[in-house]
Amino acid sequence: MKRVKLIVAYDGTGYCGWQVQPNEITVEGVLNKHISELTGEDIKVIGASRTDSGVHALGNVAVFDTESRIPGEKMAKALNARLPEDIIIQDSKEVPLDYHPRFQDTRKTYEYTFYNARYDNPVTSRHHHFVYVPLDVEKMKEAASYFLGEHCFISMCSSKAQVTSYVREIYECDVTQNGRYIKMRVTGSGFLYNMVRLMAGTLLEVGRGKQEPQWVKEILASKERVTPGPKLPAKGLTLIQIEYPEDRENAE
């Protein structure tokens, strides 16, 4: 028996999120099906991040246990020959049997993409949120800087979130512009339900001139549930990567 780690990229447009759901097509369900067919076993992957319906990923992580003779490092190629074109395994390798993708000191990085123009771009519209009102990127950058550090993010999550603590630490939160595309990139110790989409919606309110950058600081300082910006559509959100302790050690 061995445990195989997968780095999974996918276009979330056609999927009802990551997690298996009855009568729905999900990324986890498709992986289970094709890995089971490949190995001849009943495989149930364990995912690191249960992305919502319509959310994309470049670097989600999953593991599964198998007695297959296919080497861990060759599993990616074998699976990519079977998977649909909107799910691609970026890497695969064998890891210790007690390796768990969720119960570790990870850092997750997300990007939220805006397309800021008079008219939308149909070529990339499945991967951005269209905004026709001109945005003040410098003010968005200032507002984003107030997310840095450890804060209570009770206002930046769905009221449905069931957690013991709303405190999260943000290591990076930047806003960049490349032509018509504006991206919010955020790295943190973890994220509450809908947190990144609400953070992006809050920055959008600042960029549109409806709020000043200091508004973010006031929301976080309140440490109670107040109304932030809107929860933006899932299609603009991409999980970029999940960094594990061994990744940081290798980088050093």
Image: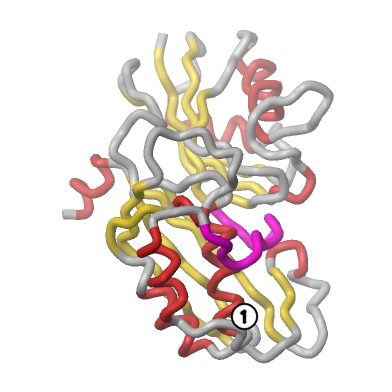
Vertical relation: 37 (above or below) 196: above
Q: Which residues are magenta?
A: 226-239
* Residue 74: percent from left, percent from top: 49, 31
10 Å neighbourhood of mark 1: few (<14), some, or many (≥20)?
some
Q: Nearer the viewer, residue 83 or 52?
A: 52
**Residue 46 left/right relative to 116:** left
Residue 189 at what x, y percent from top left? 34, 48
Q: In which image quadrant can residue 147 be found?
A: bottom left
Which x, y percent locates residue 228?
56, 65
For image coordinates 41% across by 50% down, the residue present is 108
Name the residue located 45 percent from the left edge and 82 percent from the top edge: 213
Name the amino acid type tagged 1.
Tyr
Q: Image point 39% across, 33% down: which residue?
A: 164
Q: Report the front residue among 192 and 159.
A: 159
What element does badge 1 sit on?
strand
Quick one: quadrant of the N terminus? top left
Name the residue rendered at 44%, 54% in the picture.
224
On whether residue 107 falls in the magenta region, the answer is no
Q: Indicate left or right for 10 with 193 as reference.
A: right
Residue position marked by numbered label 1 in the rendering = 181
220 vs 52, nearest the viewer = 220
